[in-house]
Amino acid sequence: TINSKNWKNFRKKDSNIKYVKKLDDILNNKKVDFIIVCISWDQTEKILPKLLSSEKPMLLEKPIAFKSNFLKKLLKKNKKNCKNKFVGFNRRFYKTTQKLYKRLLKNDLIYADIRVTENYNEIINKYGSKIKNRINYVTATTHVIDLVIFLFGQLRIKSLKIIKAKKNKCSSFFANCRNKKNIIVNISIFNQNPSNTGITCYFSDGTTWDLSPLEVLSIYDKYNVQTNKKNKLRFYEPSLLRKYSENDNKYKPGFYNQLSSITKKKIQYASSIDSNI
């Protein structure tokens, strides 16, 4: 609403920003040539049919829907209009992610390990109990799963283990998967675990590419062996070959590159509506 704190803060950025009461006032405005939909996590699905019926290009904040059948029906009905609409998975546009993406094009991946750590209790306290059953649509998990699809393609789950939490209803998940090339991709989603979220790829040339955290890419080649002089124990430490960091700090990392690419119709890395099914 016009009295909300968010609107007042946004208004301070530019006094020329206009407020409208109805979505149709934006969709039917011929002067509007691009729309960014960034509303509460549980509201986009409610207006999605109207958004997808519009011909205007859009960037929509995730999640756009909670049921795949609902999204499939909308996509089928508005297939033409969906070609210029994308979902805000900005991690695809990290420089670190794109370097790993280009490396994967050499097709010599041996194995991939994906780890996600969430603090579900903290998230529930922030958003309320209504998010409990849809928590992985909103948190870092959804970003990492999107990256998995982006980097490795669609996966087949070979086995799945769920460890139920004792103190709350949120569980941890462990999936052994295969992509179309039958490469093993293991995914671990932890509830309250000190492990760092990341994606680690092992290649046939002996290098290991570690995206952990997602803003930092470390490339290792072989390892160094060191011996403790006191107890004679040997330590094997990976040898750091190169290191890259996502340094887009003016805006939310990846956001500017994402928006710039989409408005210029350079959509190679963009997350389409159908890929969100």
Image (tube, rainbow, N blue to C red):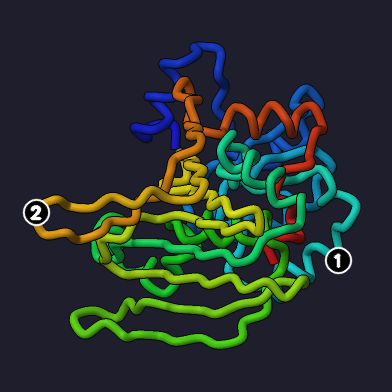
Q: Residue at x 75, y 29 (%)?
A: 263
Labelled disc at residue 212: none
Residue furthest to the left: 230
- Which quadrant of the rendered structure holds the C terminus? bottom right
- The crowding category of the residue bearing disc 2, from other C-alpha atoms within 10 Å (few below 14, some 14 to 19, many at least 20), is few
Question: Badge 2 is on which residue?
Answer: 230
Observer-nearest of 261 and 198: 198
Q: Residue pushed farthest right?
A: 80
Tag 2: residue type? Lys
Q: Nearer the viewer, residue 123 or 17?
A: 123
Residue 116, relative to residue 98: is it above or below? below
> On the rendered image, what quadrant is the N terminus found in?
top left
155 horizontally vs 145: left or right: right
* Residue nearest the observer in this picture, 17 or 269: 269
Q: Position of residue 143 (x, y in %)?
A: 53, 54
Q: Is residue 224 left or right of residue 214?
A: left
Q: Secondary structure at mark 2?
A: loop
Q: Report which residue position mark 1 lands on.
A: 76
Quarter of the image where one finds residue 140: bottom left
Image coords of residue 168 (percent x, y): 23, 79
Q: Is residue 229 above or below residue 159?
A: above
**Residue 182 seen anywhere in this rendered image of the structure:** yes
Question: Considering only vertical position in the picture, is 155 above or below 40?
Answer: below
